[in-house]
Image (cartoon, grey):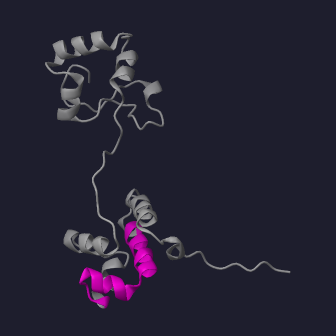
Amino acid sequence: MATKTRQFDAAEYLDNEEVIAAYLQDALDDDDPDVFLLAVADVVRARSMTRVSKDSGLGRESLYKTIRPGSRPGFATVTRLLGALGVKLAAVPARKSVPVQKVAAAVGYEDVASFRQIFKRHTGMTPADYRSRFGPLTVAHPELATAEGASAAPERRGGAFG
């Protein structure tokens, strides 16, 4: 007896805002903007084209055009559409920061307080101030490039440590 299969439809599983947000975030992480539009189309189908059209204020035809791969919808259109889907865009750091303790250890300091004093002497600011001004602390040290999201290459603008 042959096994019957059917085509996978992501829309069948997009049943709450948390799942939808995670699905869209995964699509946003792809470099291809059409992947995001296809994901939005799945969510629109899950929520009903008529309902999303009404909630977003976009006519059905405009909605179809907006979510078609290759279209280049404007920011205002995307935010209205996402609002109608129950989610919003949010900015998050592209990479996570390495804790100052790991940075200190990577450059040979066992005592974090000593590292902070020397860091301040050389840069004129504390590691926390430096992080606020220039972004996450990173070190060109292989063992820090782990699943924690740290960069293996220095990407510092200015300062004594990169």
Report the residue that reaches farthest toward the left. 124
What is the tally of numbered marks visible in this picture? 0
The image shows residue 44 at horizontal and vertical percentages of: 40, 78
Q: Residue at x 23, y 27 (%)?
A: 128
Tell me if residue 106 is in the magenta stretch. Answer: no
User: Horizontally, is 143 left or right of 73 in the view?
Assistant: right
- Where, by quadrant of the figure, is residue 101 drawn? top left
Query: Which stretch did the figure color magenta?
Result: 35-60
Q: Quadrant of residue 1?
A: bottom right
Q: Nearer the viewer, residue 32 or 17?
A: 17
Task: Answer above or below: position of 18 versus 119.
Answer: below
Give coordinates of residue 138: x percent, y percent.
33, 29
In reply to whether residue 58 is colored magenta, the answer given is yes
Q: Quadrant of the C terminus?
A: top left
Write the residue at 33% across / 45% down.
Answer: 94
**Which secondary structure is most common in the magenta stretch?**
helix
Q: Does 108 sit above or below residue 20?
A: above
Q: Residue at x 70, y 78 (%)?
A: 5
Q: Nearer the viewer, residue 113 or 136?
A: 113
The correct choice, above or below, for 148 with respect to 48 in the image is above
* Residue 159 x, y percent position in the rendering: 19, 23
Task: Determine which quarter of the picture holds residue 22.
Answer: bottom left
Q: Is residue 50 above or below residue 133?
A: below
Q: Residue at x 23, y 16 (%)?
A: 119
Where is residue 62 drawn, in percent x and y? 28, 86
